[in-house]
Amino acid sequence: MTSHLPSMSALRAFEAAVRLRSVSGAAQELRLTPGAISRALQDFEAAAGVTLFERQPRALQPTAAAERLAEDVRILFTRMEGALARARSAAHQLPVVISCEPSLLIRWLIPRLPSLQDWLGRHDIRFVSAGGPVPFARDGIDLALRRRDFAMPKTIIAEPFLTERIGPVCRPDIAAQTVPRGAMDEIVTLHTRTRADAWNTWSRQSGTAVRPARELTFEHFYLSLQAAVAGLGFAIGPVALVQDDLRTGTLAAPRGLVADGTDYVLMSDGNTAAKLFSKMLDWLRREMADTESM
């Protein structure tokens, strides 16, 4: 039965040709000649027994069957890369690699690292600080923590562990001086480039107008929140990032926190052991349970 399967080189030629819609483009990417790509596509089409391409003078147009088959081939490549990564991990006892958004990593996850290490037992942990789409196979990432604010491929497993809630936070003495006056007028607002719409989102969700006297902008939440701790003004505080400071009284949330319509998820490409994924998810949900009362 396996004797009728196309070679790995033919699979790669087919996937690249569908994705790029070009024989020459596929040849350049795979460092083969256009003739070699064309022969591989002809053999692949013959093996499939269906028409996969509509050949046009200046373009290669994949059929609907080709698009579906190419998606299956990509899943196959991802699974093979994952299988190889697992084999290398088993051979070299590599650590669990967890990708996490920078501010969540600095302000929430690292302070809880001893608890996570105890929970995962024998696994060593290595963190990668990053946001957005996750290059699991390329970077050897096992698990990722992300706010679900971008499109995720269908092949990705994503399970929620926190409903995002946000609100203005500041030093308690500033809250006592400012907020009793009523509306959020004539305040200094602290912004972050990584979520530039945070203040507008909170204003819309809470029904509160904000008319700042001055605005300061920082690259990440961990910087704008540190500025709030230093007494520079009001920052928007995502619940996980301000959980500890609210509990200790370092920061106050005088207007409370409101849901912004997003959540945080634990992600995997399906190649991480199900037991490890489940164990990490259980830990995240347990640790985040305290945020519900804030």
Image (cartoon, rainbow, N blue to C red):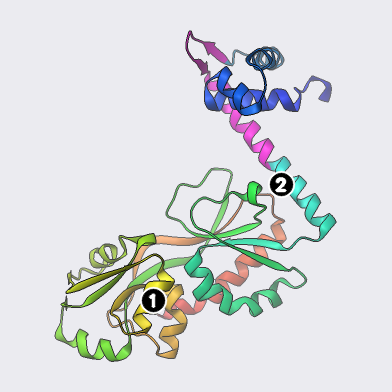
Provide the residue designation for mark 1: 225
Q: How many marks?
A: 2
Q: Is residue 60 above or below residue 112?
A: above
Q: If you read the primary sequence from the N terminus, does the residue marked by circle 1 or circle 2 appear first?
A: 2
* Front residue of this view, candidates 116 and 21: 21
Q: Which residues are magenta?
A: 53-78
* Front residue of this view, candidates 160 and 132: 132
Q: Residue at x 58, y 48 (%)?
A: 156
Quadrant of residue 232 in the image?
A: bottom left
Residue type at numbered disc 1: Leu
Quadrant of residue 79 in the image?
A: top right
Q: Residue at x 66, y 12 (%)?
A: 35
Mark 1, secondary structure of its residue: helix
Q: Residue at x 59, y 49 (%)?
A: 135
Q: Is residue 14 above or below residue 171?
A: above
Q: Residue at x 26, y 73 (%)?
A: 189
Provide the residue designation for mark 2: 82
